[in-house]
Image: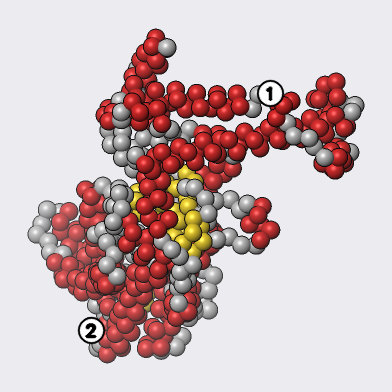
């Protein structure tokens, strides 16, 4: 009736904006601005869906005439099942509670009704999807009356498997970052249907086995890939999308199945990869001004860290204190000597970080990956805790992600080791006067890295970092400092920072390497183990590890954006390189 329609339209118009968006998305309407959606057409569409559902229900009436005759074998099987059913459950069947045969027939009728209703609902959904493919670009405001009479929504599908869908949502949201499901950017059902009709059905070597399944951030599409590799499939999809109606609207990723394991998959011991369809905008949103401030602070802490080792030299500390006393007395003072001697350490340490980022940039440029400008994260222990370089777009595959992730830390580790070696050589060549002006680091700190310690002892003499018997187990160990050339100290700090970047967790370089090696689920398990180990080690041996634990837990814990192809494994050579990197982390 007109009055009822007007009432429904008014109720919709008076609803909050977010509620209008939910209703429109439920109806399968693709929109840029909710205010552009025609309220009357939308309400009419939902009303027609309601009528369709009622018609299906009416079609199920008169079961006495439609109900099939069940065979004696079917009835006997149900009666056998009832033998283990407690009596209190049978009591729910009322007057038939003591008659197993009657209960069995009632159960068979109920199952038949459910199956029949489900089949009719599925047919309605298929007819609805077909109509959407025929007129997918029309909005409620532009449809004619005939369009409105035949256009359906995706309302039916949301009633199925609610428990399973909830579990699916949890798994997908755990495996993929929030940036893949930005509000208002999630692909619509209409877009998914166009992808099926215009793209996937035209690729000869890929056979979809079902309709798009809605998941957080987009849709999952199952099917059989007959290409020789996942990369060939993605290339074929990209080529087809470029000539379709969803050009530059959808991003299709070939990934491991992120949904709960089904009974069929358990019995078959097989989990086929799926297509994960998202919007093209999966970039993590960043506050440029905040990140610039963080980087500036990191440069400041790096300068502080460059000064600190020189103040461990008693001669330099005494000279600095004398100048500070002059300043406190209002007299002329000069701390320029301290600044001058700290510049080589600061410059070489920052050079290691520049090389780290340059390696990332070089790989990204070669692989045509789009990345953000790096953000340096401050630390009072090593000057810099880490650097954050985010991906603007999805990498082509796991090989590209691996190469990009590992290039920075490995470059930093190699240059840091070279600086330690060079610095130790210069230390050994200095005369006594120059040696007395060298900065130093506590013995306890130098002993934290087996790799750095091995290089130092190789150049300067075995046993240099051994703990004297008189200092073992005492607080005196903290007062023992080892004098080293600034290059060696810069290399030591650079080695720690770059090695710790390879810890496999979240969006760190190590987390990306882990994702390329083990896949998303495996990377999550490896990340949890690494996080626990990092926390325990930090509690008992290193403030740096404890600080890094806090940093990655709060700021780098999100999963990486999906690669376009996460199915093809990385090469064996890369596996060996990852193994070597793991050994370096343990030694550093």
CA gap, disc 2 and disc 1: 106 Å
Q: Residue 56 location in percent, x, y? A: 57, 28
Relative depth, front residue between 283 and 412 = 283
Q: Quadrant of residue 13?
A: top left
Look at 44% across and 41% down and name the residue there: 129
**Residue position for label 1:** 62
Q: Nearer the viewer, mark 2 or mark 1?
A: 1
Look at 66% across and 24% down and name the residue there: 61
Q: Residue 74 location in percent, x, y? A: 82, 41
Local crowd at mark 2 within 10 Å, few (<14), some, or many (≥20)? Answer: few
Q: How is the image coloured?
A: secondary structure
Image quarter in which the C terminus is found: bottom left
Determine if residue 129 is in view: yes
Relative depth, front residue between 66 and 171 = 66
Relative depth, front residue between 412 and 181 = 181
**Relative to 459, residue 534 above or below:** above
Q: Is residue 492 left or right of residue 290?
A: right
Relative depth, front residue between 309 and 102 = 102
Look at 89% across and 28% down and name the residue there: 99
Q: Residue 550 location in percent, x, y? A: 43, 53
**Relative to 188, residue 5 above or below:** above
Q: Quadrant of residue 379?
A: bottom left
Q: Residue 182 location in percent, x, y? A: 36, 43
Chain-order first, disc 2 or disc 1:
1
**Relative to 349, residue 217 above or below:** above
Q: How many marks?
A: 2
Q: Which mark is residue 433?
A: 2
């Amino acid at each position: 009736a007109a009055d009822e329609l007007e009432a429904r339209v008014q109720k919709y118009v008076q609803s909050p904006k977010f509620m209008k968006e939910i209703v429109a998305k439920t109806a399968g309407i693709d929109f840029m601005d909710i205010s552009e959606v025609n309220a009357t057409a939308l309400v009419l569409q939902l009303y027609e869906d309601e009528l369709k559902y009622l018609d299906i229900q009416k079609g199920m009436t008169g079961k006495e005439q439609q109900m099939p005759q069940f065979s004696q074998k079917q009835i006997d099987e149900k009666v056998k099942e009832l033998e283990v059913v407690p009596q209190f459950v049978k009591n729910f069947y009322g007057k038939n509670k003591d008659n197993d045969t009657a209960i069995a027939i009632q159960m068979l009728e109920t199952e038949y009704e459910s199956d029949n209703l489900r089949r009719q609902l599925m047919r309605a959904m298929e007819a609805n999807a077909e109509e959407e493919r025929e007129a997918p670009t029309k909005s409620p405001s532009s449809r004619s009356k005939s369009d409105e009479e035949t256009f359906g929504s995706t309302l039916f599908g949301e009633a199925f498997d609610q428990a399973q869908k909830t579990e699916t949502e949890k798994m997908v949201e755990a495996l993929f970052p929030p940036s893949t499901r930005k509000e208002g950017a999630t692909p619509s059902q209409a877009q998914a249907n166009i992808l099926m009709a215009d793209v996937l059905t035209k690729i000869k070597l890929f056979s979809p086995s079902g309709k798009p399944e809605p998941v957080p951030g987009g849709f999952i599409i199952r099917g059989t890939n007959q290409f020789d590799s996942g990369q060939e499939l993605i290339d074929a999809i990209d080529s087809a999308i470029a000539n379709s109606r969803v050009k530059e609207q959808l991003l299709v990723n070939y990934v491991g199945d992120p949904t709960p394991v089904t009974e069929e998959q358990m019995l078959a011991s097989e989990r086929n990869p799926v297509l994960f369809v998202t919007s093209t905008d999966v970039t993590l949103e960043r506050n440029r001004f905040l990140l610039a401030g963080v980087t500036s602070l990191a440069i400041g802490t790096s300068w502080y860290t460059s000064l600190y080792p020189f103040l461990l030299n008693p001669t330099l500390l005494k000279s600095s204190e004398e100048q500070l006393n002059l300043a406190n007395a209002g007299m002329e003072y000069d701390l320029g000597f301290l600044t001058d001697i700290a510049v080589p350490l600061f410059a070489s340490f920052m050079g290691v970080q520049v090389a780290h980022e340059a390696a990332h940039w070089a790989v990204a440029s070669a692989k045509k990956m789009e990345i953000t400008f790096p953000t340096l994260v401050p630390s009072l222990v090593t000057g810099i805790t880490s650097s954050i370089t985010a991906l603007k777009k999805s990498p082509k595959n796991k090989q590209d992600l691996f190469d990009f992730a590992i290039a920075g830390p490995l470059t930093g580790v190699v240059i840091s080791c070279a600086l330690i070696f060079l610095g130790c050589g210069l230390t050994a060549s200095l005369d006594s006067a120059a040696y007395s002006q060298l900065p130093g680091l506590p013995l306890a700190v130098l002993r934290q890295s087996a790799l750095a310690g091995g290089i130092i002892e190789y150049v300067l003499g075995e046993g240099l970092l051994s703990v004297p018997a008189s200092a073992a187990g005492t607080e005196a160990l903290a007062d023992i400092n080892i004098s080293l050339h600034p290059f060696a100290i810069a290399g030591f700090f650079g080695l720690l920072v770059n090695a710790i970047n390879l810890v496999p967790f979240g969006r760190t370089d190590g987390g990306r390497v882990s994702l390329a090696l083990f896949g998303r689920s495996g990377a999550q398990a490896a990340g949890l183990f690494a996080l626990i180990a990092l926390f325990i080690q930090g509690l008992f041996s290193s403030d740096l590890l404890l600080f890094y634990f806090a940093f990655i837990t709060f700021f780098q814990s999100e999963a990486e954006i999906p690669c376009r192809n996460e199915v093809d494994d990385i090469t064996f050579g890369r596996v060996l390189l990852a193994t070597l990197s793991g050994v370096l982390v343990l030694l550093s």
